[in-house]
């Protein structure tokens, strides 16, 4: 864990509890981000929730980002981000893990490389947030109780927040039935 210049009470606890795992941390505009591997994400997130010294009792958000063509991008394309809040310490922590697709991302296929463990067993409120990430980015959450689309219809052919999705869509607007006031 490269935390030499970053001081945060939780980072040392995570490093001591998971000595075999590879971590990194960063600080941007006062906000600390803990970056970890997808294989240990669930265990670390459970630790951050249950450890009394960490006590991140609220999962504020689960989101993702597509770093396609990002100038300062790392070698991986997608990031899953959990936003955690500890009320007892008045602290906010971002936890991020990187995923890289193993196949072409232009369609609606489920890529086995774009999967991370669900945290619904830790924070039940993660259910809809994980469904939104799946619906918009195609990132699956293993162990999710009901992983299906939540914003788009079930047969929508792609994941619209991926950066390789065209801004004007792929014919969705052109194929809509036009209804005027006289027709109703």
Image: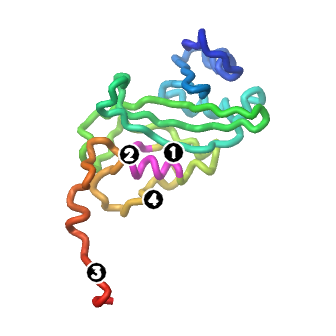
**Magenta-drawn segment:** 129-140
Which residue position holds label 2?
A: 137
In the rendered image, which quarter contains the C terminus? bottom left
**Which SS type dominates the magenta stretch?**
helix
- For marks 1 and 3, give the one nearer the viewer: 3
Q: Is residue 12 above or below residue 84?
A: above
Which residue position holds label 3?
A: 179
Q: Is residue 101 above or below residue 170?
A: above
- Gap between marks 4 and 2 measured at Cα: 12 Å
Badge 4: residue crowd in 10 Å (few <14, some 14–19, many ≥20): some
Label 2 sits on a secondary structure element that is helix
Q: Who's the residue at 55% across and 12% down the image?
A: 2
- Gap between marks 1 and 3 measured at Cα: 42 Å
Give coordinates of residue 156: x percent, y percent: 31, 59
- Gap between marks 4 and 3 measured at Cα: 25 Å
Residue 20 picture quarter: top right
Badge 1: residue crowd in 10 Å (few <14, some 14–19, many ≥20): few
Label 3 sits on a secondary structure element that is loop
Give coordinates of residue 24: x percent, y percent: 53, 18
**Mark before the other along the chain sequence, 4 or 1:** 1
Q: Who's the residue at 38% across and 45% down the image?
A: 137
Mark 4 near mark 2, Cβ–Cβ under 8 Å? no
Residue 50 in view (yes/no): no
- For marks 2 and 1, give the one nearer the viewer: 2
Residue situated in front as seen by the camera: 104 or 61: 61
Which residue position holds label 4?
A: 150
- Gap between marks 2 and 1 measured at Cα: 18 Å
- For marks 4 and 1, give the one nearer the viewer: 4
Which residue position holds label 1?
A: 143
**Mark before the other along the chain sequence, 4 or 2:** 2
Mark 4 near mark 3, Cβ–Cβ under 8 Å? no
Residue found at the far top of this picture: 4
């Amino acid at each position: 864990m490269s935390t030499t210049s970053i001081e945060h009470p939780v980072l040392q606890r995570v490093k001591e509890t998971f000595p075999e795992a590879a971590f990194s941390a960063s600080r941007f505009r006062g906000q600390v981000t803990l970056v970890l591997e997808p294989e240990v994400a669930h265990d670390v997130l459970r630790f951050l929730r249950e450890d009394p010294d960490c006590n991140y009792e609220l999962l504020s958000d689960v989101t993702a980002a597509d770093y396609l063509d990002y100038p300062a991008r790392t070698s991986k394309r997608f990031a899953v981000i959990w936003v955690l809040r500890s009320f007892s310490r008045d602290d906010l922590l971002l936890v991020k893990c990187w995923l890289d697709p193993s196949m072409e991302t232009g369609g609606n296929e489920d890529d086995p490389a774009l999967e991370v463990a669900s945290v619904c067993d830790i924070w039940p409120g993660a259910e809809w947030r994980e469904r939104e990430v799946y619906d918009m980015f195609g990132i699956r959450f293993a162990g999710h109780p009901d992983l299906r689309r939540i914003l788009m219809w079930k047969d929508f052919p792609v994941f619209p927040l991926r950066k390789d999705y065209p801004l004007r869509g792929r014919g969705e607007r052109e194929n809509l039935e036009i209804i005027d006031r006289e027709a109703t």
